[in-house]
Image (spheres, rainbow, N blue to C red):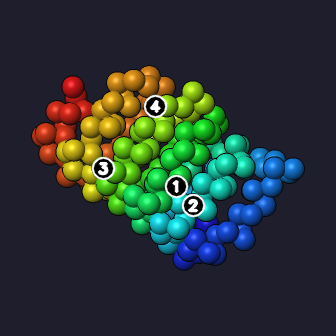
Amino acid sequence: LSKNPLTSDGIRPLLDPLNMESSPSRLKILNLNDTQLGSKGGAVLASILHHNRSIEKLYVSHNNLGVKGMKAMAPELAKNSMLRFLDVSHNSIKKQGAVQLVDCLMSSTESALEVLDVSGNKLKAAGMQPFARLLAADRRITGFYAGHNEIGTEGASILHN
């Protein structure tokens, strides 16, 4: 579905079958990169993730989810025991969205996340602080991508320490 201008309204009817608890999905990879979901798309994705625990790889880059979209998605992302790979790059989640995501992941006993891509999210150096906490606490994460965030040497130092 990548690179189709679906928006949050257009994606709902396509993904509604994934919301059916009575008929579990076997969908393992969902690629919604660059589908113009916007901040409302975070709530739609949260609903899908709430009812669908089979997704192992989720790609939602370039959707302008913003802080609001990340806040809607983060609790469900953390509860998903099958999700191993998450690409939320280029969504302007900023530090506030990063804090929400990390707090949810760190408080979860169910998260199995191994690879996280937060590249291009306007995080700056301060936005690396929550991820430094996550990487120090969660040994399951083996891949972390944070390019194009203008972190500079200060952000690199935060991640290193």
Horizontal side, residue 86 vs residue 14: left or right: left
Distance between mark 1 and mark 3 Cα atoms:
15 Å
| Number of other residues with Cα within 10 Å of mark 3, as a class: few under 14, some 14 to 19, many 20 or more | many
The disc label shown at residue 95, or none: 3
Residue visible at 42% across and 45% down? 100
Residue at numbered disc 1: 72
Horizontal side, residue 51 vs residue 97: left or right: right
Distance between mark 3 and mark 4 Cα atoms:
16 Å
Give the mark nearer the N terminus: 3 vs 4. 3
Q: Where is residue 147 in the image (x, y as percent from the top left)?
A: 29, 49
Amino acid tagged 4: Met
Give the mark nearer the N terminus: 4 vs 2. 2
Give the mark nearer the N terminus: 4 vs 1. 1
> Quick check: marks 4 and 2 in contact, CB under 8 Å?
no
The disc label shown at residue 106, or none: 4
| Number of other residues with Cα within 10 Å of mark 2, as a class: few under 14, some 14 to 19, many 20 or more | many
> Quick check: marks 3 and 4 in contact, CB under 8 Å?
no
Give the mark nearer the N terminus: 3 vs 2. 2
Amino acid tagged 2: Ala
Distance between mark 4 and mark 2 Cα atoms:
21 Å
Residue visible at 46% across and 54% down? 70
Distance between mark 3 and mark 2 Cα atoms:
19 Å
Tag 4 secondary structure:
helix
Tag 2 secondary structure:
helix
| Number of other residues with Cα within 10 Å of mark 4, as a class: few under 14, some 14 to 19, many 20 or more | some
Tag 3 secondary structure:
helix
| Number of other residues with Cα within 10 Å of mark 1, as a class: few under 14, some 14 to 19, many 20 or more | many
In which quadrant is the C terminus drawn?
Answer: top left
Horizontal side, residue 123 vs residue 152: left or right: right
> Quick check: marks 1 and 2 in contact, CB under 8 Å?
yes
